[in-house]
Image: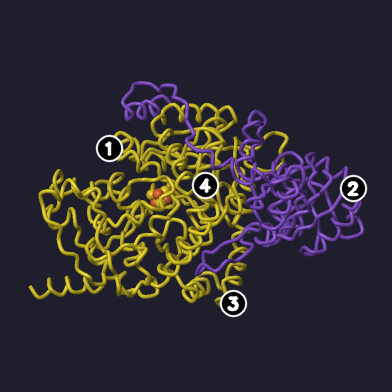
Chain colours: A purple, B yellow
């Protein structure tokens, strides 16, 4: 069936022969933008950190200067084993790889290497480390672009994930996350993820079990002077 | 599977399910737990009515302009590198899927929970050509390994199984020798499915929402299987019911906010994956090919009908969790893929009154579903209208007997007053809402509503029949 035939059937069902440009969609309310509107950046950060803890995420607050020490601490709170780092300019700037050199074998996702090598790297790692674009206070969610140096596998295959979060990029809720995507919709990567804590299920007798297919542990490192 | 999930007659299904006490208890427990969590979430969010007005407005706007938005979506998805195909019905959708599997010489597929693929019977169609397709949502997987048992709820498919049964199935089918602690059984399945993910040729998913402005597919999961299937296999096939569209990310915010809270009473799902085209050349992992199969399967007829509003549904499952009839009879009693008020409203439209007239009876018209539906679908009015049509136009039932005050309707009270699965004591108001019946009842008298438990009522009715 062609596009035209299919769309034609839909138009016909709507009582016309071809699609018409819709009248603008009017929002009767603005409830979504009202949430946490009056919060200061500090209050948003506290709300984000508090809800992160509630959903089982370990939270670290640090500065750029103390970042290497905090990262080591965060890695020690996770499952022991190899580490895979996203190839992200911020991680270089903060000296992530150097900080970890004495702690565990740490390797960076390599866009010049093959699928097999990279996926194996992530599959054999116990911890994956990546940088969030934005974080949402209401639901302790991080917005993650999974592309290029931040391969999709980095935050999925290892048992633990550590997200680095810029304090200045903590926003109230999904509304702001979606507005960000809308503003950048012309350069959208093929995979964008909103992630809120460790993978979980309640499929057996509604008992919450953490760690089904994705990570079992998640840590948020909030860098307060970024 | 397909829309129909049982070959038993209506009466047989009722009997079987009313006697299944574990199922009845677990449904009741799930209703109480999730309904309370949902209520808490919306209380905390505030302005539930305004939120759902927004959500309903968005869905109505999309449906009224579905041709325009579909065209926009298709054009943007193609620009992003996806291949878009169209299927009028289940046969066409399955044929397209088979064609892709054959072209790719693919024999192993992993699937992340998708209602529309169940609706079209995709698993069976692929198995016929030798493809092994594994469900990766834990609940769906547990059903699949239990001799393809059927789901009893659209969000929590294995709701009717207890841990003992699950342990037994894992032991018999997969050699599991651990205990019946959910953590341990989950860990065992995690190991099996991880290998399946890594070995799969093709990933199959549904689509919670599709963003017209960017050609993006939005997938929500808690377990991470939605992310997994869009990370490892080299080909990704999306099945999308044609009404899943939102105009832009702005609307996705509202819809997602409602779906997470209404579905399982959470502020958000753990993952929302937004997939726009296949992986870029600068990406290492992710599928190289992305196919999007847009499925009609009866939807355009619903769109043209007086029942267009039913297509606003976002498959959250709240209506069934709120429904006192569902509480009594359980998901399997409906014998269809979509149980509860949604099923009674939608299935006769998608698949015909003749075969599915009986499920419209599993409803007291109490209206509890309307109160929780995040997109304000007039569910009980729709069900009532179906009964009228079944009696008056289709002449499939005598109107007075079944159409209005369905026999089932008279025994089920309002859910808010309805506290346990087994006791109907102290029920005050068991009457249907009069609203939609007003006109009709002008010329007729309201029947007396017996204050009896549903199962007792059903047993009595059957006994009387047997005596005759
Ligand atoms: S009909 Fe409404 S409450 Fe029921 S599943 Fe659909 S959206 Fe949810």
In three-dimensional space, the C-alpha distance between marks 2 and 3, rounded to whole angstroms, equals 44 Å
Q: Nearer the viewer, mark 2 or mark 3?
A: 2
Which chain hosts label 3? Answer: B
Q: Secondary structure at mark 4?
A: strand
Q: Which residue is mark 4?
A: B205
Q: Nearer the viewer, mark 2 or mark 4?
A: 2
Q: Position of residue B467 (x, y in %)?
A: 9, 75
Q: Residue at x 49, y 36 (%)?
A: B246
Q: Residue at x 54, y 44 (%)?
A: B105
Indicate left or right for A100 with A213 as reference. right
Label 4: few (<14), some (14–19) or many (≥20) C-alpha neighbours in 10 Å: many
Is tag 4's residue or tag 3's residue first in the polypeptide sequence? 3
Q: Which residue is mark 1?
A: B306
Mark 4 vs 3: CB contact within 8 A: no
Cα distance between the residues tagged 2 and 4: 39 Å
Is residue A66 rendered to the left or right of residue B196? Answer: right
Q: State if disc 1 and disc 2 touch (CB < 8 Å).
A: no
Graded by Cα atoms within 10 Å as few (under 14), some (14 to 19) or many (20 or more), the crowding at tag 1 reads: few
Q: Vertically, is B318 above or below A19?
A: below
Residue B153 higher or lower than A32, as above or below: below
Q: Residue B430's x, y, as percent?
A: 26, 64
């Amino acid at each position: 069936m062609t596009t035209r035939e299919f769309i034609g059937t839909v138009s016909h069902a709507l009582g016309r022969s071809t699609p018409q440009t819709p009248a603008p969609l009017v929002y009767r309310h603005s409830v979504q933008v009202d949430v946490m509107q009056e919060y200061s950046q500090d209050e948003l950060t506290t709300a984000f950190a508090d809800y992160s803890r509630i959903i089982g995420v370990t939270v670290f607050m640090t500065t750029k200067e103390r970042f290497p020490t905090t990262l080591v601490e965060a890695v020690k709170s996770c499952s022991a084993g190899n580490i895979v780092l996203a190839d992200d300019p911020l991680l270089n700037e903060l000296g992530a790889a150097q900080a970890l050199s004495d702690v565990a074998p740490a390797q960076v996702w390599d866009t010049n290497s093959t699928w097999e090598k990279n996926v194996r790297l992530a599959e054999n790692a116990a911890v994956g480390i990546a940088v969030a674009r934005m974080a949402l206070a209401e639901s302790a969610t991080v917005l993650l672009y999974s592309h290029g140096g931040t391969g999709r596998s980095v935050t999925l295959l290892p048992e633990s994930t550590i997200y680095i979060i810029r304090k200045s990029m903590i926003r109230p809720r999904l509304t702001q996350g979606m507005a960000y995507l809308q503003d950048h919709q012309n350069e959208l990567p093929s995979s964008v993820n909103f992630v809120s804590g460790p993978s979980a299920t309640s499929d057996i007798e509604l008992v919450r079990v953490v760690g089904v297919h994705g990570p079992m542990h998640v840590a948020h490192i909030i860098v307060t002077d970024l | 599977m397909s829309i129909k999930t049982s070959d038993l007659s209506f009466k047989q299904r009722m009997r079987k399910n009313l006697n299944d006490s574990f199922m009845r208890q677990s449904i009741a427990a799930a209703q109480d737990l999730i309904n309370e969590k949902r209520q808490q979430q919306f209380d905390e969010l505030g302005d539930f009515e305004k939120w759902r007005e927004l959500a309903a407005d968005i869905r109505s706007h999309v449906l009224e302009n579905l041709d325009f938005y579909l065209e926009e979506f298709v054009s943007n998805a193609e620009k992003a590198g996806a291949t878009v195909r169209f299927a009028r019905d289940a046969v066409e959708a399955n044929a397209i899927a088979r064609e892709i599997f054959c072209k790719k010489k693919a024999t192993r597929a992993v699937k992340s929970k998708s209602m529309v693929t169940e609706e079209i019977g995709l698993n069976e169609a692929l198995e016929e050509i030798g493809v092994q397709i594994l469900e990766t949502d834990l609940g769906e997987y547990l059903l699949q390994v239990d001799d393809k048992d059927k789901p009893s709820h659209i969000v929590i498919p294995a709701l009717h199984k207890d841990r003992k049964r699950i342990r037994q199935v894992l032991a018999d089918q997969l050699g599991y020798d651990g205990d019946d602690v959910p953590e341990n059984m989950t860990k065992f399945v995690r190991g099996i499915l991880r290998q399946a993910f890594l070995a799969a040729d093709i990933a199959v998913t549904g689509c919670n929402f599709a963003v017209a402005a960017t050609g993006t597919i939005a997938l929500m999961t808690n377990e991470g299987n939605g992310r997994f299937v869009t990370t490892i296999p080299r080909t990704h096939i999306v099945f999308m019911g044609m009404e899943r569209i939102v105009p832009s990310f702005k609307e996705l915010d509202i819809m997602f906010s409602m779906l997470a809270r209404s579905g399982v009473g959470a502020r958000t799902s753990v993952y929302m994956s937004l997939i726009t085209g296949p992986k870029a050349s600068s990406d290492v992992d992710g599928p190289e090919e992305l196919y999007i199969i847009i499925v009609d399967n009866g939807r355009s007829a619903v769109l043209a009908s007086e029942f267009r509003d039913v297509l606003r549904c976002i498959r959250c499952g709240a209506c069934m969790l709120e429904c006192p009839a569902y509480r009594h009879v359980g998901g399997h009693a409906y014998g269809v893929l979509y149980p509860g008020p949604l099923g009674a409203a939608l299935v006769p439209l998608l698949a015909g009154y003749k075969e599915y007239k009986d499920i419209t009876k599993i409803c007291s018209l109490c209206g509890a579903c309307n109160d929780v539906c995040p997109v304000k679908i007039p569910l009980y009015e729709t069900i009532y209208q179906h009964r009228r049509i079944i009696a008056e136009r289709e002449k499939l039932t005598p109107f007075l007997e079944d159409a209005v005050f369905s026999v089932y309707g008279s025994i089920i009270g309002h859910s808010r007053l309805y506290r346990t699965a087994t006791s109907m004591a102290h029920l005050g108001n068991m009457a249907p809402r009069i609203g939609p019946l007003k006109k009709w009842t002008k010329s007729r008298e309201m029947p007396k509503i017996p204050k009896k438990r549903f199962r007792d009522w059903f047993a009595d009715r059957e006994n009387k029949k047997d005596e005759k």
